[in-house]
Image: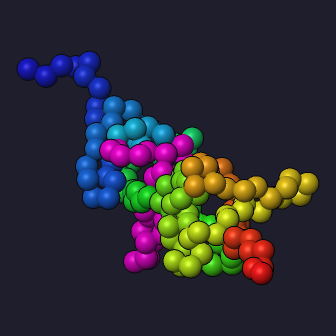
Amino acid sequence: MSNEHEKPKFHYFVNDERYEWHEPHITGKEIKAHLRGEKHDIELFLIEKHEGHEHLHPVHDDTQVSLKDGPKHLLAKHKVYIYFVDGEKYESDRAHTTGRIIKSKLPEAKRTYALYLEGHGKHPDELINDDTTVSFEHDKEPKRFYTVPPASFGGA
C-alpha cells in the first residue's frame, strides 16, 4: 500500500555516484553537503552534453540546479590553489597551509631561506615563519612569495 502523501524523489549523479533528493531543485551547497570529505575544497560542475560534446558549467553554493526534468550529472573535484615562490608556480589542494609546507616544496637549497609574502598596495611584505598559517581562500589572484637567503656577514 503506497502513501499518497509521500514526496517524489529526484535523482542526480556526482562523479557517477547516484544521490536522491526530495525537492525538484537543489543548490550547490546542498549537493556538497551530501559529499564526503572537505566540502569547502570541492568545486562542482554541471555536465551538459550538446552536439556530442560535454560542457562543464560551474555550480556555486547558491546555484539552483533543477532536477524536475530528469537526473543531472555533476563533476566534483578538489579545488586547486595556485601560488608562486620566486616566480615558480606551485599548487595546493588545501585552502590553508603553513610556511613549513610551502618551504618543503622548494628546492633543498632554499628550504632554510626566509619566506616572505608580497604585500599589495600599501600593505608591506610579510615574513612567513614555519608555523605561520597562510590562507588561499577568497583570493582572486595567486599569492606571490619570495625567499631571502640567510644574512652572511663576511668573516675575518
Residue 147 pos. (x, y %): 69, 71
Residue 20 pos. (x, y %): 28, 39
- Residue at 51% x, 77% y is 108
Residue 78, can we see it? yes
- Residue at 42% x, 68% y is 49
> To which quarter of the image does residue 31 belong?
top left
Residue 43, can we see it? no
Instruction: State yes or no: residue 59 in magenta.
Output: yes
- Of residues 112 and 125, the one drawn nearer to the viewer in this rendering: 112
Residue 101 pos. (x, y %): 51, 60
The image shows residue 48, relative to residue 72, as above or below, that is below
Left or right: 113, with 71 as reference point: right
- Residue at 59% x, 69% y is 112
Residue lying at the far front in this picture: please name it: 156
Across the whole image, how many numbered discs are drawn on residues? 0
| Residues shaded magenta | 35-61
- Residue at 48% x, 51% y is 41
Q: Quadrant of the N terminus?
A: top left
